[in-house]
Amino acid sequence: MTPDPAGRRARLPLSLRRRAVPWARQRPTWRDAKPALIAAAVERARARPSGNWYVVGASRDLGGARPLARTVAGHEVVVWRDAEGRAVGGPGSCPHLGAPLRDGAVRCGRLVCHWHGLALEGAPFAGWHPWPVHDDGVLVWVRLDDAGGEPPLEAPVVPARPDPAGALSAVYTGIGTCEPEDVVANRLDPWHGAWFHPYSFVDLSVLEAPGRSTDEDDDGFTVDVSFKVAGRLVVPVRAVFTAPEPRTVVMTITQGEGVGSVVETHATPLGPDDRGRPRTAVVEAVIASSDRAGFALARRATPVLRPLLRAAAGRLWRDDLAYAERRWQLRSTGRFPG
């Protein structure tokens, strides 16, 4: 892939592939996707500080009549907006008789329990103590120091991204039977893209991959790939995959259409299911930007485009969660290769 010419904004972002390579005749990538290399990248990610922050969900899901609720690392969590519009939250159990606050109603910035009407404003009350909450404009995070066990940070490790005010964003959430590291390992294996997702990616080539050192400057996967549109029409880009903290992998477009756009994949541990198996929520945020004049029209069409972006992410994660679940199953039974 070559950098865009100076006049690229006047050109369409689409390219026409000269020839379509049948799926089975692609160049095999298994020799490049070394298990030890992927495992080392996962371990480096796990060693980075998270400050005990976990993604709960999408910012746009706050502000309604019901709280945003999720079990995170075995803790019931509820988050809502107070009277000033700030994101606040804490334990999901009512301090009165233990009612599930996820079933409560938000009225005038207060979370009202549906059992007896106890109202919380986001401040300590009757033995209920809030947890730190961070709203970055796209995602909502909660800090659980007991669960994380790390030195706390004032804010989560949010990667560089386009300004949400001028971007098109969508958030997808899926849940799988696996651990966060299995989701991270999937995203730190770019070699599987064109083989496992031929309906979305073609002409994938990994240009650079990190070694086994802990050098922060040697820790990105640089990939040339084309996103399929229809037939032989594709959008070629260059992207870099990095892991800024243990439960996050970010794909940043560095060349081609939408330079600076990111896809953030966050893996939030939920807790065991009724069989004792771990469950993880994949919260994936697409934050797209472009300097093309037509992008302003796309932003105005966000209510229409957002469901389409979520559906595209859902199709990919239908497969990738199966990948992550299989990896966990093999690890948990001692049958994982390597």
Image: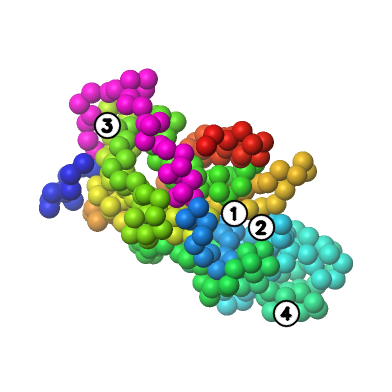
Contact, CB < 8 Å: mark 1 with mark 2?
yes
Instruction: Provide the secondary structure element on which disc 1 rests.
Output: strand
Q: Is residue 13 above or below residue 285?
A: above
Snapshot quadrant of residue 268: bottom right
Residue under circle 4?
A: 124
Marked residue nearer the N-terminal end (1 or 2) = 2
Contact, CB < 8 Å: mark 4 with mark 2?
no
Q: Nearer the viewer, mark 3 or mark 2?
A: 2
Towards the viewer: 6 or 110: 6
Marked residue nearer the N-terminal end (1 or 4) = 4
Instruction: Provide the secondary structure element on which disc 3 rests.
Output: strand
Residue under circle 2?
A: 72
Q: Which mark is residue 268?
A: 1
In the rendered structure, which amino acid carries the disc numbered 3? Leu
Mark pair 3, 2: CA separation: 41 Å
Instruction: Give the x, y percent position of residue 180.
Output: 58, 50
Residue extending farthest left: 6
Mark pair 3, 4: CA separation: 56 Å
Residue extending farthest right: 97
